[in-house]
Image (cartoon, rainbow, N blue to C red):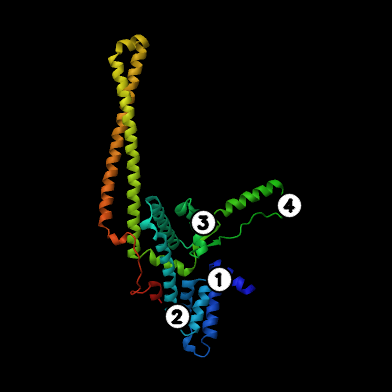
C-alpha cells in the first residue's frame, strides 16, 4: 500500500531532469536486462531508450504502461503511437466538451464558452512553446480571473504543477532570528515563491498531443471562426457604446443650442439682468462648449465609421468560412504518421 501511494504521487509530481536518468536506467534494466535476456536481438539501443524518455519523461504510469506492453511482445513504435493517440483523443474530447452546449446556449453563455475554448487553446500554445511556465505568468497571460479553469485542468491531469526549487530563507537558525529577521524571511519567502510554482503539461505525451492539435487544420479553422465571431460581437458592443455616446452628445448640443438661441433672442433682457460682461462671458462659454461637442461628434462619427468598415470585413470573412466549421466534431487522422514517432 505504501509503495502504491508513492507511485501514485510520483505520477502526479513531475521531476524533470533527475528522473530522466533514472528512467533511462530503469528502461535499460527492464527492456534489456530482463526483457531481452533470452534474445539479444530484442535489446533496445541507447537512441531508442532516449527517444522513449523524450516522449514520456519520468511519468511513472506511462513508463509502466509502455514497458508492460513491450514485454508482452508489442512493437515499441506501435505502443508509443497508441499512447500518444490516446492523449490526443483525451485533449480533443475535452475541447469538444467545452463547445458542446454552445449551439443551443444564449448569446452571453455562448460567448463565455467560446472565450473558455480560446483560453484553453492559448494554454496549449504556451505549454508547447515553453515546457514550464510560472503559475502567476499563465494566469496573467491566459486565464486572468478564471483561475478555477487551470485548477480543473490540473485535477483532470491535463496540466500539472511542480516547484522551481527550495528557497534559501536565511543563513541563521530559527533560534537566532529576531522578530525583524523573521519578518524579512517571510517577505523573502513570499516574493521568491511567487514564481516558484510552475505549470507544465500533465505528461510528456500530453505536451506532444498539444503540439499536434494546435497544428491541426480543422482545429485552427474552428479557432479562427470563434475568434472572428467574438471580434464581431466585441465591435458590435463597441459601436453600441459609441452610438449611445452620440445620442448623449446630441442631447447636450440641443440643450446648448436652445440656451444660445434664448441668449440671442432675449439679449437685451439678459444684458440688463446679468450685465454686459456676464452676458458675453456666458454666451462665449456656451459657444465654446458647443464647439467642443461638435468636435466630439465628428470624432465619434469617425470611430463609428471605422468600426462599421471592420465589421463589414469580419462579416464577409465569417460568411466565407464553411458553415460546418461553426461547431466542428473534428476527428484527427494520422495517415501521415505522428512526426515524433516517424523520427525514430
C-alpha distance separating marks 3 and 1: 22 Å
**Image height of 331 relative to 166, above or below:** below
For this rendering, which residue is in front, 18 or 336?
Answer: 336
Mark 3: few, some, or many residues within 10 Å (few <14, many ≥20)?
some
- Please, what secondary structure does the residue beneath circle 1 have? helix
Q: Which residue is mark 3?
A: 135
- In the rendered view, does 11 fall on the left or right side of 227? right
C-alpha distance separating marks 2 and 4: 58 Å
Question: Residue 297 placed where, x, y %?
Answer: 30, 33
For this rendering, which residue is in front, 59 or 99?
Answer: 99
C-alpha distance separating marks 3 and 2: 35 Å
Which circle marks residue 224 in the picture? none
Q: Residue furthest right?
A: 175
Q: Quadrant of the N terminus?
A: bottom right
Question: Residue 26 placed where, x, y %?
Answer: 55, 78
C-alpha distance separating marks 1 and 4: 37 Å
- The residue at the point 52 percent across, 84 percent down is 32
Which circle marks residue 19 in the picture? 1
- Please, what secondary structure does the residue beneath circle 2 have? helix
Q: Which residue is mark 4?
A: 176
Disc 1 vs disc 4: Cβ atoms closer than 8 Å? no
Q: Nearer the viewer, mark 1 or mark 2?
A: 2
Between discs 3 and 2, the one toward the N terminus: 2
Which circle marks residue 76 in the picture? 2
**Image height of 266 relative to 18, above or below:** above
- The residue at the point 49 percent across, 89 percent down is 40
Amino acid at each position: 500500500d505504501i509503495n502504491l501511494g508513492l507511485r501514485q504521487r510520483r505520477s502526479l509530481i513531475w521531476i524533470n531532469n533527475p528522473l530522466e536518468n533514472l528512467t533511462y536506467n530503469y528502461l535499460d534494466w527492464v527492456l534489456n536486462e530482463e526483457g531481452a535476456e533470452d534474445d539479444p536481438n530484442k535489446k533496445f539501443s541507447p537512441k531508442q531508450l532516449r527517444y522513449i524518455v523524450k516522449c514520456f519523461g519520468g511519468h511513472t504510469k506511462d513508463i509502466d504502461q509502455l514497458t508492460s506492453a513491450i514485454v508482452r511482445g508489442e512493437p515499441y513504435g506501435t505502443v508509443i503511437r497508441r499512447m500518444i493517440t490516446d492523449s490526443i483523443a483525451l485533449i480533443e474530447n475535452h475541447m469538444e466538451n467545452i463547445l458542446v452546449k454552445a449551439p443551443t446556449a444564449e448569446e452571453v453563455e455562448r460567448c463565455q464558452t467560446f472565450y473558455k475554448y480560446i483560453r484553453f487553446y492559448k494554454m496549449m500554445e504556451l505549454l508547447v512553446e515553453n515546457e514550464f511556465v510560472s503559475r502567476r505568468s499563465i494566469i496573467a497571460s491566459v486565464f486572468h480571473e478564471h483561475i478555477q479553469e487551470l485548477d480543473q485542468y490540473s485535477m483532470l491531469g491535463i496540466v500539472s504543477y511542480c516547484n522551481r526549487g527550495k528557497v534559501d530563507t536565511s543563513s541563521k537558525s530559527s533560534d537566532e532570528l529576531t522578530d525583524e529577521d523573521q519578518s524579512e524571511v517571510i517577505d523573502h519567502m513570499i516574493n521568491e515563491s511567487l514564481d516558484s510554482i510552475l505549470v507544465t503539461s500533465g505528461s510528456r505525451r500530453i505536451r506532444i498531443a498539444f503540439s499536434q492539435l494546435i497544428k491541426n487544420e480543422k482545429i485552427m479553422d474552428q479557432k479562427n471562426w470563434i475568434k472572428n465571431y467574438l471580434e464581431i460581437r466585441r465591435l458590435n458592443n463597441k459601436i453600441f457604446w459609441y452610438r449611445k455616446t452620440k445620442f448623449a452628445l446630441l442631447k447636450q448640443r440641443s440643450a446648448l443650442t436652445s440656451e444660445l438661441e434664448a441668449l440671442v433672442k432675449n439679449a437685451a433682457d439678459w444684458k440688463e439682468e446679468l450685465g454686459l460682461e456676464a452676458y458675453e462671458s456666458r454666451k462665449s462659454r456656451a459657444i465654446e462648449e458647443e464647439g467642443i461637442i461638435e468636435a466630439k461628434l465628428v470624432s465619434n462619427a469617425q470611430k463609428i465609421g471605422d468600426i462599421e468598415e471592420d465589421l463589414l470585413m469580419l462579416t464577409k470573412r465569417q460568411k466565407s468560412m464553411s458553415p460546418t466549421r461553426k461547431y466542428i466534431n473534428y476527428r484527427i487522422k494520422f495517415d501521415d504518421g505522428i512526426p515524433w514517432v516517424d523520427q525514430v
